[in-house]
Amino acid sequence: MISSLCGMFEGVVLLLAEAGSEPTPSNFWMPEGASKQAPFIDLSFYIINWINYFFFGLVTLVLVWFSFRYRQRSKHVEFSEGPVHNTTLEVTWTVIPTLILIGIFFMGFIGYLDLRTPPKDAFKINVTAQQWAWEFEYPNGAKSTSELVIPAGRPVQLVMRSKDVLHSLYIPDFRVKQDVVPGRYTYLWFESDVVTDPDDESDFFWLFCTEYCGDSHWNMNVHVRVFPDEDFEEWTKEQARWLDVIPEQDLYFMAGPKLYKRCVTCHSLDGIDGSGPSWGPRNGLPAIWDRVVKGEGEVSGGSKFIAGKNKLSDYIGDGKLYETPEAYIRESIYNPGALLVAGYGNQMPTFQGQLNDRAIDAVIGMMKNIDQFNADGSFKDQAMIEEAEARIAEAKAAAIESTPAEAPAGAVSE
Ligand code: CUA
């Protein structure tokens, strides 16, 4: 009986998994359904929902009818002995709900097994959650933080870990959700045929962090895009080398704003301090590059702090801890606990292994030219961007001719 029930439901899952390349439309209860898992999960929900409607209606009707039928008709109440036992009735109201519950159990169980058992050939993407960003790493070494791009029509498995606290990855349109727990790996898999337009950034599904993980928890809402195989291949290749094809002089404004998205949650550009000191002019001091060069910034702690030496100028310069301002900024990104800006604790995560030398150059370049950027981190001079884009397109064309199909594993690109 159990195996035949399982078989029956498995048939339903397979049948529903045939759902095509169009998402199921959203309605009052559910957002769009855009994965192969969605139809069965929705069906389970609707079946349980309709069972609830049915019994709610039935119980309410009987309640109203009984209140009317057995209402008190006169002041004189005569208590007669009612029936105490009705085997048929009792068996009915025991057996029917039991069967319904067993049915619901199997539906849930099959759905659970399906969600917990990724196919062996699933495409694996490593996910690292960190306050307050996701990092998606692809088998060719490509990394992405601003969006999760997946191949259409292939099962995708996320191998997830957290660097700090409990996060939870949730893609409502795919109907999947899984906690990301520090100190252990968790998995999630899904498959979607619903292609989003690779040329249209506004065509996406939402991915949420659905576990409150601190200050900027909101920043862990990113986009999921589903690309056809060819575009996906191209995208991962491009991600793996996106920094390498940007000419040196264009790095700070072509790569800077993209990298700054990781910093913006704590470091504003407009002088208003957040979880970290603003990069703009703050507390009567100039913007970040000038206050580092002039050594005017105040420090008050950290593993390399020396008691009594409270000015950055005590640490930066010939023969001091940091020879150059660049060396100090680089260490502040790789080892944020070394010197702490006055008024701040050791909160910032390290970006060691996430930002390579070119990325650090881009960030420092952005700091040096901070007046060329808007408060949201975008670059002001559109004409310069267009010129740089032309140079990058050339560099890319040259790179496509000269690089092997697969970038070396573990290449750090962002
Ligand atoms: Cu991560 Cu909320």
Image (cartoon, rainbow, N blue to C red):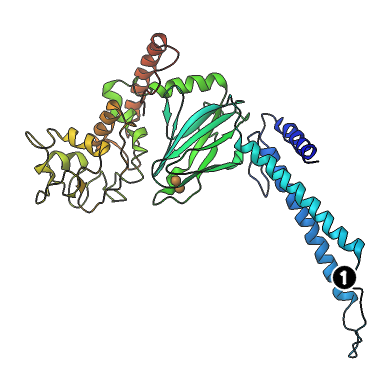
> Label 1: few (<14), some or many (≥20) within 10 Å?
few
Q: Residue at x 66, y 43 (%)?
A: 26
Lateral position of residue 19 relative to residue 369, left or right? right
Which residue is label 1 attached to?
Answer: 65
Q: Is residue 45 positioned above or below 153 on the image?
A: below
Lateral position of residue 87 relative to residue 152, left or right? right
Lateral position of residue 8 relative to residue 158, left or right? right
Question: Measured from the top left, where is residue 214 in percent x and y?
Answer: 40, 51
Question: Measured from the top left, where is residue 291 in percent x and y?
Answer: 16, 43
Q: Quadrant of the C terminus?
A: top left
Question: Measured from the top left, where is residue 261 in percent x and y?
Answer: 37, 38
Q: Residue at x 9, y 51 (%)?
A: 308
Query: What's the residue type where badge 1 is placed?
Result: Trp
Q: Residue furthest top?
A: 401
Question: Measured from the top left, where is residue 172 in percent x and y?
Answer: 58, 42
Quarter residue 324 falls in: top left
Q: In this view of the protein, can residue 60 be seen by the observer? A: yes
